[in-house]
Each structure stands twice: as C-alpha cells, then as structure tokens.
Amino acid sequence: MHRNSLTRSSQAWLYIFPALLILTLFLFIPALMSIYYSFTNFNMLSPQTRVFNGLTNYITLLKDPIFGRSLRNIGQFVIFIMPLQVGTALGLALIVNKKRAGNTFFKISFFAPVVVSLAVTSVLWLYILNPEQGLLNGVLSHFGISAQPFLTSPKQAMFAIIGISTWQGAGYQMLIFLAGLQNIPTDVYEAAELDGANAWERFIHITLPMLKPTSVMILTTTFIDAFKLIIQPMVMTQGGPMNSTITPVYYIYRTGFTDRQLGYASAMSVIYGAAIIIFTIVQRRITGDDNNVK
Amino acid sequence: MSNSHKAKIAKTIISTILITLLALLFLFPLVWMIASSMKSESAIYHDLSSYRAFLPAFDINQWGKAYSSLLARFNVFIYILNSLFYGLSVTAGSVIVNSLAGYGFSKFRFKGRRFLFGLLLAMLVIPGETIIIQKFQIARGLGMLNTPFAVIVPALAGPFNIYMFKNFFDAISNDIIESAQLEGAGMFRIYWQIMLPMAKPAVATVGTLSFIGSWNDYIWPLMVLTDSSKFPLQVAITNINNSQPVYMNQVMAILTISTIPLILVYIFFQKYLVQGMGASGTGEK
Amino acid sequence: MKHWKLSLLAVTVLSIMGLSACTAKSDSGASGDKNIEMWVQYSKEDPEGKAMKTNIAEFNKTNKQGYKATVQYIPRSGSGGGYEDKINAALNSNSLPDVLTLDGPNTAAYADSKIIQPIDKYIANKDDVLPSIINQGTYKGKLYAIGYSESGVGIYYNKQMFKEAGITDQELPSLTKKWTWDEFMDISKRLKNKFNGPAIDMQLSDHSEMSLYSLAPFIWSADGSITNKAGTKSVGYFDSAKTASAFQLIQNLVKDGYTTISPKEKGFQTGKYAMLMSGSWTIQELDSQYKDIDYGILPYPVSPKTKKLVSPTGSWQYAMSASTTKTKAAGALIKFLSAKNQMYRTSMKMTVLPARKSVSKMMMSKVTPNMQFLIKQNQVSGHARPVLIKYPQVSRTFAETVTKATYYKENPDVAALLKKQATDMQQYLK
C-alpha cells in the first residue's frame, strides 16, 4: 500500500500542539479577554468596579475625532511605507546576496538600524531633522531649497516618520528576503546563464517567481506591522504636532495605560483589529495569495 | 589586459564605492554610538555638528571612563548573564516550537487546518503592547510569576515564525519525504534529519529575530519578575536612560554593550546560513 | 553538519535545567503581621536606591515593635512606565504591597479608586513639611501620600554670554528683586540680537508632563488657573483673560524668536543658548560634565500685573495601599521614612530639593550656591500641580494647548484657542 504522509492527520496535532498551546494562552485568550473588556467600563485602577456597559464604548468610538485622525494617519503611512520599505529591503537583499568583497560588512551595515536602540537613532534623527540648524536643511540649502520644518510641521511630520521607519525597518525584511534568495537553487541560474539570459532577465524570470512565497509573506507581514506602528511616533513626536502622527495602536496604548481606560481601549482594539484582518484578506487577494493554504 | 576586463574592474570598483556609501547611511548610528561611548558627555554634544561625532575622544584615557563609571553603577555582568540565558533559551526553544508547528501545517493534512492557519494569520494582527495586562493574569494563573518560565515560555511561539517555517517546508518536495518513508524513517526523524537542515535559512532568520526580540524586551520581564537579581539587561538600560541626570556617554556605553551580542548572533546565524547552503549543495559558487 | 543540532539541543536542555533549578527555590518568609513589603520606582543601584537601602536597614534595626520591611526595586522607564504597569497588574490580581511609591499627579486617581488610604496620622511634625508637598498629597481634605523630596525649576543663565550681550549684574533679578515678563522679554531680545539665535531653551519640544509642570507657573503668576479649586470646571478658568496672558507670553517668545519649538539638544550646556529653563538635576549635570560653562540660576519671571513669584514643584511620594492588613507596621515605616533624618539622607544622596523646612536648614551649608537658590525659591514660591483624577488627560490637553499656541501662524488668537481647549479639557473633569 502506498503510504501518503500528507493524508495522515492525527499525528499533525503532536507537532502543532506546543505552539498552539502557547499561542492560545498568551495571545488568543488575552485577545478574547479584550473583546469582553470592550463591553465594560474597565478602569485600570478599579478592576473590582468593572461593569458591563453594552455598546457604550463603541458609540463613543464613532464620535472620537482623535481615533478618526489616527486612522487617516495610519492610512497615509501604510500607503507609502509598503512600496518604500519592501522595495528597499529587496534591493538590499539582492546587493548582499551577491558574493563580493566586504559582504559581511554590508550585511551588518544594512541590518544595523534594526539592532541599534531607538534611543540612539532618535537622538541622531532629531538632530539631522532639526529645522533650525539641522544637517538635512544644511544639505538642502546647498541645492537652493529653503529650510523645511520636518517633524515640527503637521504636514511633513508623517513623511519624516515614513522615511525614518523605512530606514529603520528595511534591514528586517532584508533578512527574510535573504533567506528566500538563499533557498533558490543555483543550478537554475546556471541553466539560464547557459541559455544566454542576462542579469535582468534572470531576475525577472527566475528570482522573482521563485521568491514569490517569501514576497507574499513579507508583503502580508509588513502590511500588518505597518498598521501596528507605535514606537517611532511615540519617541520622535509623541503623536504631534496637532495629532498629525498619532497612530491607532499608540492611541490605544495611551488610552489603556496612560489614561487607564482599558474598556474603551479594548473597544478600539477590537474594531481596529477587525479592520486590519479585513484589509489583509483584501491585500492577500490582490497579491494573489488567497489560496496559500493549499 | 583587455578592455572588457578593465571595464569589468571599473564597474566593480564603482559599484563597491556606491554600496559602501549606502552602507554608511545605515551604519552611522552604530558608529556614533560606539564613538560616543568613548568620550565625555560634553564632547558628544560639542562634536555633534562635525565629522568628529563619529570619532572617539583623542585622549585614550577617556575611552574607558564611561564604561568604568557604568560598571561602578551597575552590576552589568549579572544582567548580561540573565539576558543571555533568556535570549538563548528563547532562541533554541522558538526554533524548535515554531518549526514543529510549521512542519505540522506544511506536511500534514488534517481537519481544521485551513481554519487554524487563518486564525494564526489573524493573530499576527494583535499588537502585543495592548494585551500585556491580560497576559499577566494568565501567567499568574499558571503560577509562573517570578520564574524564568514567565519570561521565556510566552516568547516561544509566534505566528510569523510558524508562517516562515511553513513557507520553507512547503518549498521542499514531498518526494523527499516519501522516499525517506520508504526507507523506514518516521515523520519525526524526517523532520529532525531532513526538513530542519534543509530549512536552514528559516532557522537562521527565526533564530536571529527571536534572540533580538527577547534581548530587547523590557516591560514584560519587569512585570513578571519580582526578584531584581533575575532582571535582564534592558532593565538597566532603561534605568540609565531615565534617571535624571541622564549621562549620554554612559547610555551609549551600555547600549554598545547591549548591541554587541545582537550583532554577534546575527553574524553567527548569517555565517552558518551560508555554510549550511554550501554543505547541502544549493549554495552560491 | 551535525554539531549545530547538538548545540541547539544542549542549549535547550541547559535552559530547562536552569529553569527547574530556579523554580525549586520558592519564596521564603513573607508571613506574620510584622513583615511588610514596599515597592519603589528606582533601581537598587541608583543613589536613591542606596539611600533607601540604608534607611530600610535602619528601620529594621531600630524599630521597637519588631517590624521588618523588605523593598522591591522596580526601575521605571520614561514617565513611570514599567513601574506603573506593574502596579496596574498587581491591582488586577489584588497583590499590591503594603507600602508603595507614586508620582504626585497620580494622587487623586489612586485615592479616588481606593487604592491607597489616608496617612494623616502617621506623619510626624506636619507643619515642618512644605505646603506644596501637603497640597500634592491631599485629596478631598485628607493626606493620602507624602512626597519625600521636592523638585523645582529655574532659569539657568550663561554668565559669559550675558556679559558679552552687555547685561550687567545690576540688571539681574533675584528672589527679592523679581523680574517681570517684560524685563525677561527685553533681556531675551538683547541676547537674541547679540547671538543671532534663540535666547532660551524652554524645552518646548518636550510635549510630555514637563509642559504643564514647568509652564503652569506662568499662569499662576498671572492669577490665572487651569481649573476651579474643586477641579470640576475648566471653562471659565482655563480660558480666562489671566490665563490667556500667560499663553500670550509663550506665543510671543516663540513669535519673536526668543525661544524655539525645536531646540538643539544640550544647546545651553554647549554654549549655544544663553538661558535654559530646567530642573535641579541640570545642576548635577553641569557641575560634573560641563565644567567650562559658568552659570547661575535666575528666578521665574513674574506677571507684570501681579508681580507674584511662582515656581513649579512635584515629586514622588510614599503611600499605604488600601488593601494592606498591616496598617500599623506600614504606618510606622512611612513615618520613619518621611522623618527628618531619612529625608535628609535621600535628598543629599540624590542631590534633590528637600521636602521639609528642617531638612532645608540641614542642607543649606552643604550644597552649592545654585542649589541653595533653588531650595530658597522652592520655599517661597513653590506651587503644587492640581490634584485631579484624570490628570494625565488634563496634562496632555495642557501640553497640546502650549504646542498650538506656539504655532502662532495657525493659531494667532490665543483667546479663541483657549476657549476651544477649555471645552476639550472640560470633558475630563467632573
């Protein structure tokens, strides 16, 4: 009898079980608790007086201008960060995937912003972007461009955050792209080279198609991570000026922890989480991965 | 020397210069951090507007000063040991737990598989920052508080890491499994002796990312641990960065100390990745 | 080929062994009515932590009832994160310690939620405690928390740069010879013209708690206010003409280029700005790291209408949890820690302002003239922040108002701005 491993089921659970148990305990149940809290007036300081208050939080949410503003901000962020960061990451991965002198140095350099603390990078970026005596305005003035306000301008602040986030995060996706590139067998390239394909053709006809599972994964996770933006605005602008860089997760965090309104923060989490899931499904349809789980 | 050969050399030189410039764009904070840890607090800010920002103090005696006052202030050694212990445990555990799950999703067909995997992707959406109190309640319910389990166990499984492993296992042909089975290998042996070595890029990536994640975590360990002798290095970093007056050279010194292991782990996994590829015959020439 | 898997396995096994070894050691002690636990927001290795260690050892040794206190050191991040997260988690699991520390602005929320209980009767020699400390810890007429040190802000100035700008010593203000906002503006103008850049770093890029803490004294100096006394109304108070005069000052300072919303990091310390508005911690920094800067400290500028000197205050405090069953022991500990000698030890070790008048006297001869100045300014003009349940939200609305006022092109009309902001703030008051 032909034993087909892919039809046996009971054993699968053994392999999945440890991960499933941990995720259920520390991610899934806490998330379910959030859903429950979202229907209560949970104040962090008085958990005992928590009572069910129906849809009150959700109704407040509809009228909350800051939440609305944060949604607009994150929309802007996601639209720009996706092509920028994924494109940069792929470019960097292609550079370091080629054997050349100093490769380790380049690999470390591109990855450096991921491991260097934001305490370091934020000081430097604030200095570079300082409107009055900052480095970048100094450079721009050489090209006859007048001084820009950058992070202190409600119009430019989000773009500055987008730039810094790309710079900071690209190394992370580069690492994953690199793993994907390393997984492409070299004999495929060799065969193509024999057929006379040039570098560009090899990239289009071999690298990209073979990188598809990795690319789809990166697009999905970058997309989701982009929606979870919190650290950069928290450190660089505290959401300002005039709420122009406040993001939903930052606002949720602030409401839940600084303002201690855990009930209301949970309601925001639930609505926002549901929205991201819907967006992600749409995004995966667009990138053609709706049947990833074959 | 032929013209085309010259052109090739010129091209290599130009591209190397350009890439080096690009690399510097990403590297400058790291250099600044290390240089700043080797000079006085005031020199950091005096130098900020010139190239000297990226050089340590001219006086060699200054180099170790921030480090020695740092070591006088904190027992950094214990914190590093704790962080290493958490980081290595999380790294090893996370590679095993997530690859097992990825294997399960990739090479088995079972009821509810699609649904479970969808749920897994949905869990990617949950921002860790917002569920920390709930997580704490669970850890307390399990009696894990003030044990290293509380720090390590929740970090062992991650939807992204499972996804990553599943992707890699998907790319490995089922024929390999079937031929191994014909030779009498069980599914676990196939996982351990065939699949895991073939997914080395994923092992390297998940390993690197897990270590970084664990190394940089601050709030969660602080919440679940009560005994300060068990605190990780991040607690000391946060402390130095937030108790007024903040001495920037000391901040940079402890951040340098804390960044080195991250870079070492990264280099280790990257090296190992390239070696691994060579060994299994699919690496670069 | 194989060794990597072996090492992986080895690490895992080692980890598990380490884990079981650690868990085998269970919590010891912590029983009996005489053992109390305390949480503090700093690390054991800080000067503050070292002072606490000495104080606790002394308490355990000298108290006659046999009380034994143990302290858990929980270093906070930024604005209390980490430590406060831990408090929140403990609240949800009903495991607060007997004694805890809390930041001044948290008093109302903690007292209102019945997390902490009144401690009036445990404080010795209350008249000796600075009024700002009492106000900060008082909610609905009862003292819930006692600050163990004080903080203050002054106008640091660079003597050399002042001289270069032709500002004579006779023109400089002091605690007895106050300077009005107009005089402050005038000196700023001369500095700006001389050095062709902002005269003072007022830390306007800090949109956190620093905003209300350091700028509200301008409002109080003008007899304005953030809310009414009961803390129930901001409309009619935050948008009053008196409050508006202070915001107008801030707006003018930015508009005229005397200060900036994006100051250079450490601009004063590196001789770029002639003045800096900052707290006592900057003394320590300047004296140890920027010895080439010859500086002094000037008092807060006062409103020309009232000439009233007001300066900010605020500190972390000791409090007793409402859930403790060992009130006697916890009370004894708070009494001990807030007594003169223990406060003296903490203030001296941390180089911070004292919270008791008697401690001030003890410190005066032992600290630098600049520190002496801040101690004195604190005693004559210290003003506590409002005690409000939703303080974080109010403070944030305040900071937002400051930011908006400094964007003078977008918000030229301060009165109209305050009207809107007062309505915004009103939703957080009850």
Image (spheres, grey):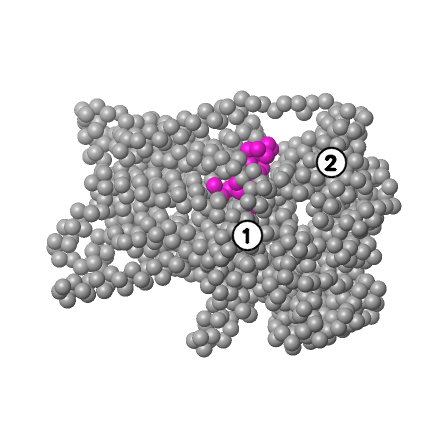
- Badge 1: residue crowd in 10 Å (few <14, some 14–19, many ≥20): many
Q: Which mark is residue B249?
A: 1
Marks 1/2 in contact by CB < 8 Å: the verdict is no
- When the figure is inspected, residue B187 is found, relative to residue A257, above or below; the finding is above
SS class, disc 1: helix
Tag 1: residue type?
A: Asn
The residue that appears at 20% across and 58% down in the rendered structure is A199
The residue that appears at 79% across and 71% down in the rendered structure is C170
> How far is mark 1 from mark 2, CA to CA?
31 Å
In the image, the segment drawn in magenta is B215-238
Foreground mark, 1 or 2, reads 1
SS class, disc 2: helix
The residue that appears at 81% across and 49% down in the rendered structure is C360
- When the figure is inspected, residue C44 is found, relative to residue A2, above or below; the finding is below
Q: Is residue B59 left or right of residue C182?
A: left
**Residue B83 at least partly seen:** yes
Kindly identify which residue carries mark 2: C55
**Residue A34's x, y, as percent?**
55, 41
Which residue is at the front of the view, B283 or C87?
B283
Which residue is at the front of the view, B66 or B161?
B66
Mark 2 belongs to chain: C
- When the figure is inspected, residue C293 is found, relative to residue C103, above or below; the finding is below
Predominant SS of the magenta segment: helix
**Residue B62's x, y, as percent?**
53, 52
Mark 1 belongs to chain: B
The residue that appears at 22% across and 47% down in the rendered structure is B284
**Residue B226's x, y, as percent?**
60, 33
- Badge 2: residue crowd in 10 Å (few <14, some 14–19, many ≥20): many
**Residue A27's x, y, as percent?**
49, 38
